Image (cartoon, helix red, strand yellow):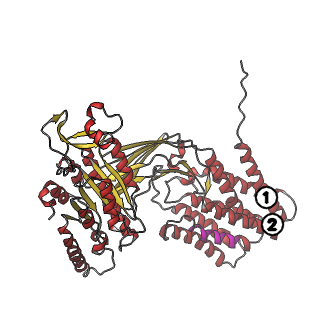
Amino acid sequence: MTEVQRSTAPAPALLRWTWRAYLLVTVGGGLAVLAVATRDAVPLFGGIPLLLAPFLAGWEGARHLSGVTLDWQARGLGPDVTITGVAQGRFGASVVDVAIEVERPLSAADAEPPRFERDPASIRFAIHWTLSEPTITSLPPPWIVWRDPLSLTERIIAGPCAPLLLDRYPPSLHRLGSIRLEKTTPLPGEIHSRVLGKSGEFFGLREASQGEPPRTINWRATARAGRLLTNDYRVDRTGDLLVVLDVRPTSLGPEADDRLLGVARAAVHGIAESMIRDKTRIGFASFGEFLTAVPLSTGRAHRLRILRAIGAARREEVAGPAMRCALGLRRLYPRGVTALVVSSWTEDPSFNLVPYIQRQGFPVVLLSPSPLPMRARTGRLEAADEPLAERLERLERRVRLSQLWVHGPVVDWEDFWTLDPLSRILRRPAYRRTS
Amino acid sequence: MSAPPGSPDRGGGLATTVLLGSVACFFGFLGGLPLPFGPVLGALGAAGSAAWRTYGPGRSTTAPLVPALVVLVVLTVTSPAGPATELFAGLTGLALLLWVADDPARPSGGGRRAASMIAPAALGVGMAWAITLAWAGRPQEVGVAGGLLAIALVLLAFLVATLPRRTPAVPDR
């Protein structure tokens, strides 16, 4: 996946003195004052270079460098990330004193040292990271900083411009869209007609959108309902999917919650991308204290809407009651839509959204990112005890998740770079039938 | 053969550390401290700064300067006034700047690229020393006056040099 961003730097920022410059000026100034006070010239001679150097460095910086144009992009698949870019400007001989600093996401580690190729007019850079888990994040543009050779002054010559979207999710999600989801259950009053419309067999009624051609409006139903309704056809329809993201706080703590939520957001993003690519209608809801929802739809505009909603989903400080989530979903989405609930399930059963959502008429599939890979090898235990502790934690988690199987199939997601178990469950709808 | 510009300096700034240590040693030798202590203190200052920069904790680039600066302050405060001590005080300050420019964490050739900053500072030291030698009067007071005058002259010269130049107005046809 490749995304390219182009940004032009604003006017060069003001010069900034470093702590080293303040130290030199302080010592040099102190020596000069001492010399004048004691009428002894030796301290003053020692202080002359220290006093002059920061001002000379400032003048050196003030007459250097103009605005810089930056092109950068992210490449790679799965855990491999390669950030490449080129900064163009009139650097001249001071190109070696220009540093490019890219903020590294928390889940990334350097795969190899960054490479820079410099010439007087441009700096090319390539940075290789390996991600420890799926990630969706917005990389702020690199800071392009000029520092004088004495490191007394620095000047940012390209500030915050367009950020770069970095989204990495399990590669198996790229094929998820080819899975034909089970059709949504008929709405009350919905009939299966043998009359084929221009797009296939009649599927149901839906609210007419703006600019809908008059021929598609179902005028009888409109007269009955008192609002514009239009026919919906079955052809190409693969069933709808509703993704519910649990952003309530858990007992794991804010740090682990944020990491798990980051993994869950990346997975939701991958699922949404894949489904929308195959024209499946998808809805997204996040539940913390209250429910935030994006209605069922598909298309490019909806993709952006969902992406924005996923990006805005953050861990909330207060947990709302599960019943509130279920009632909200019932009000906003038609019954029968397959609901994929993404939650870490570390709490007691009353914390679980699943039974409540299921009781409102949504067949549920559960996806649970496991905290165990993140908690393993934290160094709190000795090497000999680590496998035993991992095994006990895994058993405890398995017992907890087993209680949820009565409501729907559960995917215990431990290997973050594959979601094949979820694909298998979605591909075999028999598993999704609830008793 | 020196490393190409832009690559980290693998030499670790050894040459400039030796230069700083030598100048500080000789300054300590001329200074007012008893004979073994002055040179030893000068050498310790340079060695301490170099060791801190190479093996010190963290990524601070400012802290390694502290040992050398402390030694410079101690030596200048304890030195008697005189042309030789004044000259070597200035040379020790210049050697310290050169050592700062030769940072192994930065691209090699820092000393060469910092010439536009170190040379005017050296000019200031040279002017102050020349004034001290040339003008009659009590050496201490002439030295202080010469040093302040040199600082003022160098700053004024650079202020004038960096003033924006007025472009000639083109008559409107």
> Could you say whether the residue bearing mark 2 is in a helix, strand or loop?
helix
In the image, A283 versus A23, the foreground residue is A283
> Could you say whether the residue bearing mark 1 is in a helix, strand or loop?
helix
**Secondary structure character of the magenta stretch overall:** helix
Residue B164: give x, y in percent of width and height: 70, 39
Q: Which residue is found at the position 25% from the left and 58% from the top? A: A340
Mark 1 crowdedness (10 Å alpha carbons): few <14, some 14-19, many ≥20: some
| In the image: residue B44, left or right of residue B75 | left
Q: Is residue A402 above or below residue A150?
A: below
In the image, A350 versus B21, the foreground residue is A350
Q: Is residue A221 above or below residue A261?
A: above
Count of marks, rendered view: 2
| In the image: residue A431, left or right of residue A357 | left
Badge 1 sits on which subunit? B
Amino acid under disc 1 = Leu
Q: Which residues are magenta?
A: B62-75
In magenta segment, residue B70: yes
2 and 1 marks in contact (CB < 8 Å): yes
Residue A36 is marked as 2
Q: Which residue is found at the position 12% from the left and 38% from the top? A: A194
Check disc 1 and report the residue beneath it.
B148
Disc 2/disc 1 C-alpha distance (Å): 9 Å
In the image, A76 versus A394, the foreground residue is A394
